[in-house]
Image (spheres, rainbow, N blue to C red):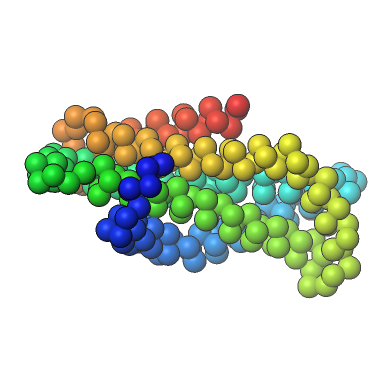
Amino acid sequence: LLSPSSYGRTGRQLLLRQVYADTVPILLGFTVLAALISLVLTRIVVVTALSYGLSRYALEMVIRVLVLELIPLTAALFVAMRCSIPNGTALALLRENGHLQALQRAGRDPLREEVLPRVLSSIYASLTLAALSCAVATVTAYLAVYGFNTAGLPIFTRLFGQVFTPPVTVLFVLKTFFFSLAIALIPMASGLYEQTAQRAGQPGQELSGLARMFAVLLVIEMA
């Protein structure tokens, strides 16, 4: 990941192709999903807060729960299900079919040609979806509460600043980054090193990778 020689002309072409394949097809669908989730949860929180006379805390709760906690985890799990776990399975099949060994015998590096693009594309997709969905959730929360006008913008901006203090912002960025590392590296490690009897169409490896990944994500969230 950190070696400059991994990003030569051939490496860049492989990387860009994999990033496009893993990010662009899911971008629109996840954006719509994030907007719907944000709208539903915002309405639930706001209506519940109003019924208990806690309306002044409703918007802050939405920002804390939705933008700070739920959206990054949802983005990571979405990328894991759609990209990184299938990529790990594809890598395992390449290894079992002898493709990785053939690359090595030909003097080429299978880590750089087959593993690195998949890892980086999963990291990129996770970070991209998390950033985009957080922006969508923020806009959706504002529109659900104040509608299409700028009257509530000063209050909303102040609340957002009170939630995203510098320490919280740093922790949020670190958590999102470690989420992306977890969902990118764990399936690749499983596909590269584990001996599997499953073939395509059998969900054992995918479920095992998902269970490991969810445990690691839970540890990161607890930390």
In the image as oriented, which residue stretches furthest toward the bottom?
148
Residue 165, position as x, y percentages in the image: 78, 42
Residue 49 visible in the shown view = no
Using residue 110 as the reference point, say whether residue 168 is left or right of it: right
Q: At 54% across and 42% down in the image, what residue appears?
A: 177
Using residue 105 as the reference point, say whether residue 133 is left or right of it: right
Residue 166, position as x, y percentages in the image: 75, 41
- Label total for image: 0
Q: At 83% across and 56% down in the image, what residue appears?
A: 157
Q: Vertical placement of 94 versus 218: above or below?
A: below
Q: Quadrant of the C terminus?
A: top right
Using residue 158 as the reference point, say whether residue 15 is left or right of it: left
Closest to the observer, 172 or 116: 116
Residue 41, position as x, y percentages in the image: 68, 52
Q: At 46% across and 54% down in the image, what residue appears?
A: 125
Residue 46 visible in the shown view = yes
Q: Quadrant of the N terminus?
A: top left
Q: At 31% across and 34% down in the image, what residue appears?
A: 189
Q: Vertical placement of 18 versus 149: above or below?
A: above
Answer with the quarter of the image where residue 188 lies.
top left
Answer with the quarter of the image where residue 207 lies.
top left
Closest to the observer, 193 or 54: 193
Closest to the observer, 65 or 47: 65
Residue 91, position as x, y percentages in the image: 23, 44
